[in-house]
Image (cartoon, grey):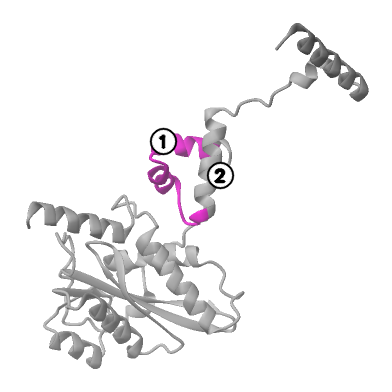
Amino acid sequence: MGKHDKSEIRQTKTALAEKLGISRGMLYYRHKKPTADEALKIDIEEVMKNNLSYGHKRIALELKLNKKRVLRVMKKFHLMPKRRRKIKFSKPNDLGKPETKYLNLIEGFCPIRPNIVWVGDFTHIRFRDTWVYLATVMDIYTREIIGWHLSVNHTADLIIEAFLDAVGKRKLAPVYFHSDQGSEYTGDEYLRLLENEGIIISMSRKSSPWENGYQESFYSGFKLDLGETNHYQDLGELIEAVAQTIYYYNNQRIHTTLKTAPVKFRLDREYLFKELGT
């Protein structure tokens, strides 16, 4: 660029500054570069927008950063995740029921492959002026929801259909199946189904939901991820939303114990075992 060109640019900027009533130096103003914390804040907000139930630990895993740094920045900019549903540690209605003959056989159990221990439970979802019931089956090795069923009826069929869905997808039954002592899980039809499959039945002690904490924890995050249900037009839309939320949990949502999503954990382990020839 020649001297004449530079002179013309200066004159043009001077004229423009006079027209705008500002100093010529203002035309050279540049926005301040965001600090490292401000840049991280933007990344955290993006993760939180797509993952409603993420706290600082999952956000740190998603961003591959130190969890203490993520927590510090979240506190600095007042970024608060949605609160998870508190897990109930008692079921008063169970206290008057007699104990079943089934013991908790999975306490302290640590399976080393899928299809050793499955756990089952159900929850209720408020939909308009009624309740809808969701039963799920989880493989505790992968934390994956492998079977589920949604119904407007609170009957034994609810949990039976969820169990059959899991068996149909896995093409086999587990060694152990664990649940609480709810009437649905102590009914003759359900117990006979499991016994005919040769499954060892395990149950939490009555009024001890923490002994089935895998499912309790799942429902806590699931309801937060599902969100408000009354904006769905009909039951079909709600079923689709439940299916999408379970898919998100299985395939995308980071599990803090696994450090990844359940399906990815399972596939990674299958590849590892194949490489090891086991």
Image location (x, y in percent) of residue 270: 18, 59
- Asked if one can make out residue 207 in the rendered structure from this viewpoint, the answer is no
Residue under numbered circle 2: 79
Judged from this view, the residue extending furthest toward the top is 3
Give the residues in magenta.
50-75
Q: As displayed, is residue 225 above or below residue 55?
A: below
For residue 235, side relative to residue 58 (left or right)? right
For residue 34, side relative to residue 261 (left or right)? right
Q: Residues within 10 Å of mark 2 (few under 14, many from 20)?
A: some
Label located before the other in sequence (2 or 1) = 1
Q: Residues within 10 Å of mark 1 (few under 14, many from 20)?
A: few
Nearest the viewer among 217 and 94 is 217
Residue 54 drawn in magenta: yes
Q: As displayed, is residue 82 above or below residue 44?
A: below
Residue under numbered circle 1: 68
Principal secondary structure, stretch drawn in magenta:
helix
Judged from this view, the residue extending furthest toward the bottom is 189
Amino acid under disc 1 = Lys
- Asked if one can make out residue 51 in the rendered structure from this viewpoint, the answer is yes
